[in-house]
Amino acid sequence: MGFRILVTDDIDNEGVELLRAVPDFIVDDVPTLPADQLLARIADYDAIIGRSATKVSETLLKAATRLKVVGRAGVGVDNVAIDAATRLGIAVINAPAGNTVAVAELWFGVMLSLVRHLTRANVSMQEGRWDRSDLLGTELKGRMLGIVGLGRIGGEIATRARAFGIKVSAYDPYIAEDRFTALGVARVATLAGLCAVADILTVHTPLTAETTGLIGVKELASLRPGAIVANLARGGIVDDNALRVALETGHLRGAALDVYAAEPVKGDHAWRRIENVVLTPHIGASTAEAQRNVAVDACEAVRDALLRGDLSRSLNVTMPAGDWSLLRPVVDLAQRAAEVARTLLADHGARAIQSLTLTRGADLAAAGTTLLSAAALGALEGVIDESRLNLINARAIATSRGITLGIAEDSAQAHPRAIEVRIVADGQEMRIGGVAPIDAAPRLTRVGPFHVDVAPRETLIVLTNRDVPGVIGHVGTALGDAGVNIAEYHQARLAEGGEALAVISVDGPGGADLRRTLLDIPDVQSASVIHFPAVE
Ligand code: NAD
């Protein structure tokens, strides 16, 4: 049986040729179509591949009765109605890795431009001057580069930096030791530690709740006088205002920016008055090669999805066999249990996950891998670029990050729909257990060695404290003062007078300072706040 594929938005020909080479495929390569024309012909196709210009709306997807795959030659999928595609069982595939080298090479371009004043030199020549004395630069050799986020792009920069004789350190608490060793990069345990040693600080993390404003007033002030800062990742990771102040006061020597908190940056913007910056208009991925790479990546992934049913590159979820409404609560429970385990470990300084094991009750045999995917999702959420992470690809991403995944059946589990997630990170272990009865809301039943009973709803607080009188009252008062409403409060202890643990379910997201407030309460030893992503 043949497949018809609609290729649009002028994606690179190398990708199109790869599809044409498959005898079973009929490929129509058309320029970007007006919405009504696309709607009129979409029912003929098994797959559509494009870039951001073509809007793949819910209306279009509903009309696309044969459609199995949407391919996006690039990273962003803002133009695709993913939730609708998921509901309709249509895979959405993107191409996140093809841009890596383009960004890494741009980094060296802007960095050399900065330290050798290349843009100023060029302007002075074009204006007919010969300003050599004004253009004394510095060398990159021997500098200490501090990379925040040693993923694909951070890694490519590290590799190339060695050729320049640059020393490289990095901070990435979510990456295992082996990657640092393989890249020849010195691992720094804290961001503060990296700021203390870096001559050039560069960020290459996704924009997440944790990385928003990651480099702010405090971090910039802690850099050595004369340091350089670069953000070619996502606007908002470095606080633009704080950066401008640090440049204006002369504390920093320079900065290189490709991304901004609010884009596009046009007209009489604040950066125009800052001299020691190299600014580019979000062109990290703008190379012919990157465009070809993303076209080839997307076309290969669509080809494999159609021919082999390989959905490992898919961004969205296809419904598992069986009754989704019965499976959904336990899938959510596994994801949340993993999120709790990861947060508790991270709050105890253990972030690099080595293994994740999902133990399931007897009635969940068929759901094992889906539950493991959900647990992997919970363990990675907020750590890697979220637009690329979902139930379908969570296991593959976890494995590629060196996390050993396993499923075990525990026939002795008290409940046939019970699960337990066990995560080991930096040698520390955390087990979170729960149960999702068919006729009642899911509950968490175990946190480490403690037996608990609480529903993981919007936000969960986990506290450990010395088992002395008065703590519950102090916690209640502190939460009340912070305007946080308690839905459930479960107190557990192993032995009288020893360590006690409280699991508190609260309404709303809690505040940014909630953890700090709780840690300030006398006798509270640790506090973690876990806010669960909304479930539609
Ligand atoms: P990646 O997912 O491969 O790597 C991101 C790394 O950041 C991961 O190793 C992760 O462990 C680490 N990380 C996450 N949270 C962290 C934290 N709080 N502290 C330290 N490290 C943390 O992503 P990538 O492909 O290398 O992309 C990096 C960034 O570059 C992304 O923000 C991406 O959107 C951006 N990007 C920009 C352009 C451009 O045009 N300028 C093009 C492509 C990608």
Image: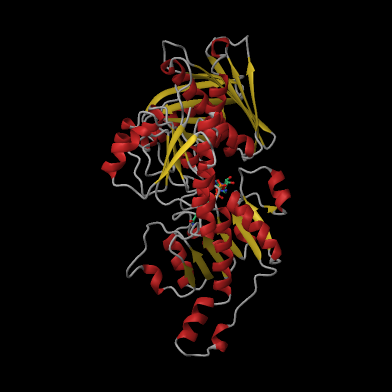
Quarter occupied by the C terminus: top left
Q: Residue at x 44, y 54 (%)?
A: 236
Q: Residue 245 appears at what percent x and percent y?
A: 44, 67
Left or right placement of residue 484 versus residue 527 in this view: left
Display colour scheme: secondary structure
Q: Quadrant of residue 106?
A: bottom right
Left or right placement of residue 52 versus residue 334 in this view: left
Q: In the displayed orientation, state which residue is furthest to the front.
A: 23
Toward the viewer: 495 or 41? 41
Q: Residue 70 appears at what percent x and percent y?
A: 43, 37
Q: How many marks?
A: 0
Residue 381 higher or lower than 226, as above or below: above
Q: Residue at x 48, y 21 (%)?
A: 320
Toward the viewer: 446 or 369? 369
Q: Residue 71 appears at what percent x and percent y?
A: 45, 40
Q: In the displayed orientation, state which residue is furthest to the left.
A: 36
Residue 268 higher or lower than 488, as above or below: below
Q: Is residue 334 visible?
A: yes
Residue 8 higher or lower than 239, as above or below: above
Toward the viewer: 147 or 464? 147
Q: Residue 409 appears at what percent x and percent y?
A: 63, 15
Residue 95 higher or lower than 405, as above or below: below
Left or right placement of residue 266 versus residue 372 in this view: left
Q: Is residue 252 visible?
A: no
